[in-house]
Image (tube, helix red, strand yellow):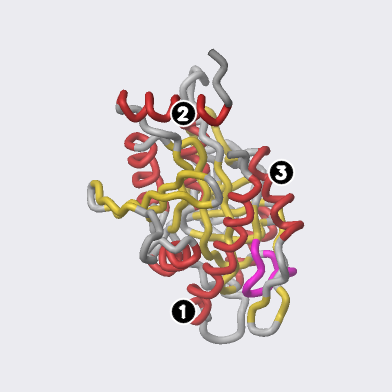
Amino acid sequence: MNLSPRFFLIFLLILASASGAERPLVAILGAYPPELVALRAEFGVEAKGSGFVTTSWRGIRFDRGVVAGHEVVIFQAGPSVVNAAFQLQMALDHFPITHVLFAGVAGGIDPALDVGDVVIPEKWAYHSEAAYLNEDGKGGYVRPDYLRASGLENFGMMFPDGVRAVRDGEGSPVNMMTFPIDAELLGLARKAVAKLPPMTKAGRKVSVSVGGTGVSGPVFLDNAKYREWVFRVWQARCLDMESTAYAHVCWANKKPLLVIRGLSDLAGGQHGKNPIDDNELSVSGIATKVLRGVLVEMPK
């Protein structure tokens, strides 16, 4: 008997449903409320007839539905690195997630960028994995024996370092200075960016770029000198409180990840008060539109 591809697919789905097997999901993350508001609005999660189903597990809301032909689950993982790592790992253990996509805001570090611009880094580092050392009385600092020279410039008593990470198949912990982003998803992001319509923030056309380094830590950064140091050390394009944790967890679980960050502020590089409160929702919306473009490019 010859079966058409469409009939065969339907037959397989019926078998999967009957056996209790779950279909693969693309995880779509936000870290804190404005990002989730933007994601749910862009994808019509709460619209009548959207097809999304909302559940809760261990205190976290999960919205499951279909976007651009992909079955997705939208949820919050964050804020800050501990929540980001814990909540993403919990979701990976509970759902059949194949890919992880994030859209949200960050502070701009690269002086060439401005509020509203979107960056999609190709690797992520922890800027606050460090040793805090005593002065030696001779203009330097007393180093413990364990602390290897990382080659990274210190910020006063703060000496940045990598983090030892483990995953199946490595044999032993690996010292990771940065965690990579999936090359295939970066390629799809470049295709998506080339097709995006112009977007503006405060009357200025925003840029959307792929590449470079992002950094994360459990710190809301609003200090010009520290911002300048982060740019010198990592040539970082943006700084946030979650993305390296996502990259760490996805590296450990061998899951493809893409992080899309719109700049809500300049992390202390601005004049006067930090403007994040005025920009977080609108810039999250810009980043979410970029994420939609990536979903469209992903194979069904």
Question: Looking at the image, which is closer to me, 160 or 102?
Answer: 102
Question: Looking at the image, which is closer to me, 8 or 218?
Answer: 8
Q: Is residue 162 left or right of residue 184?
A: left
Where disc 2 sits, the SS reads loop
Which residue in the protein does label 3 denote? 187
Q: Any magenta on residue 215?
A: no
- For discs 2 and 3, the disc positioned in front in the rendered view: 3
Where disc 3 sits, the SS reads helix
Which residue in the protein does label 2 denote? 166
**In percent of the image, x 55 and y 51: which residue is there?**
68
Q: Is residue 287 visible?
A: yes
Residue 15: image x %, image y %?
A: 37, 24
Under mark 3, the amino acid is Gly
**In percent of the image, x 37 and y 54: which residue is there?**
52
Please give the range of residues in magenta. 110-118
Dot placed on the residue nearer the N-terminal end, 2 or 3: 2
- For discs 1 and 2, the disc positioned in front in the rendered view: 1
Q: Is residue 136 visible?
A: no
Residue 268: image x %, image y %?
A: 57, 74
Dot placed on the residue nearer the N-terminal end, 3 or 1: 3
Under mark 1, the amino acid is Asp
- For discs 3 and 1, the disc positioned in front in the rendered view: 3
Labelled pair 1, 2 in contact (Cβ < 8 Å)? no
Q: Quadrant of residue 203?
A: bottom right
Under mark 2, the amino acid is Val
Q: Quadrant of residue 227?
A: bottom right
Q: Any magenta on residue 112?
A: yes
**Mark on residue 277?**
1
The relative height of residue 32 versus residue 140 in the rendered view (above or below) is below
